[in-house]
Image (cartoon, rainbow, N blue to C red):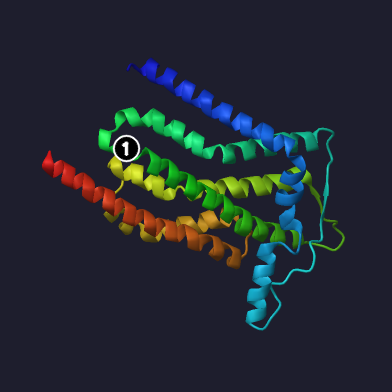
Amino acid sequence: MSFLDHVEELRWHLVRSSAAVFIFAIGAFVMKGFIFNTILFAPKNPNFITYRFFCKVSEFFGTDGLCIEEMPFTFQSLAMAEQFSVHIWTAVTAGFILAFPYIIWEVWRFISPGLYEQERKGARSFITISSFLFFIGVLFGYYVVTPLSVNFLGNYSISDLVERNIKIGSYIALVRSSLLASGLIFELPILIYFLTKMGLVSPSFLRKYRKHSLVLVLILAAVITPPDVISQIIVAIPILILYEISIFISKIVHSKEQRKAKQA
């Protein structure tokens, strides 16, 4: 196809993906009480499962330093349309997360014509693995990154004279960015797979710059978590594991590509 034909094809893939997001967003918009009260506001509760887990770990080592008794802040809405705007964007975010497998399928449909027949047979595996990694990342963001951030920032104070009245939009933006950032970060093995297929990276390249990647991972962990060492380490460990998995995947793909080149 010509360039314009490719653009037209891409446009329809984007239209169908947007329609899927819109449909799921409508469902999320209607389920306002469950989305906000049960899911999004749960990390503010001291009895949230993550806080209870850290408390048990703390008690195991003979201390209660990680136990949380209260979250000393309240929510407030300062703009007339703030709650409605938060409701809309939260629904859109939920729609994107729920529609992610379909979006990945549309991405595959767009790139598959440029692949070999044997590679196109891996569509189901690609969609399944990509969706699995994304949802694992979202859960990691919800149960690890978000509670750590809410606990640290919600309890942080520069003076007792300052009241902790958090804008609802600020809180939801924190949760939303934690979920999406974690979900996309967990797609690293998929990204490395395609970069290796295109010859842009190799296992030796990834091993050579392992130390550099460690620094980048720590910087990334510092960006998406509160500025305390424990939170950064907790977030950095899974990312480093993903990097090592990516090296293993790159090694397999690189070996297959070399065998194909020799056969050719």
Residue name at image x 57 percent, y 30 percent: 20
Image x and y of residue 243, in percent: 41, 56
In the rendered image, the vertical position of residue 105 relative to residue 168, given as above or below? above
In the rendered image, the vertical position of residue 63 relative to residue 122, given as above or below? below
Image x and y of residue 246, in percent: 37, 54
The residue at the far bottom in this view is 62
Quadrant in which the C terminus is drawn: top left
Image x and y of residue 9, in percent: 42, 20
Residue name at image x 51 percent, y 61 percent: 236
The residue wearing badge 1 is 121
Kindly indicate the quadrant of the structure image that contains residue 214: bottom left
In the rendered image, the vertical position of residue 12 relative to residue 46, given as above or below? above
The residue at the far right in this view is 161
Q: Amino acid at mark 1?
A: Lys
Relative placement, left or right, of 176 versus 132 is right
In the rendered image, the vertical position of residue 168 relative to residue 211, given as above or below? above
Residue name at image x 35 percent, y 42 percent: 194
Asked whether residue 200 is in view, the answer is no
Asked whether residue 163 is in view, the answer is yes
Relative placement, left or right, of 33 versus 195 is right
Image x and y of residue 161, in percent: 87, 60
Q: How many marks?
A: 1
Mark 1, other Cα within 10 Å: few <14 / some 14–19 / many ≥20: few
Quadrant in which the N terminus is drawn: top left
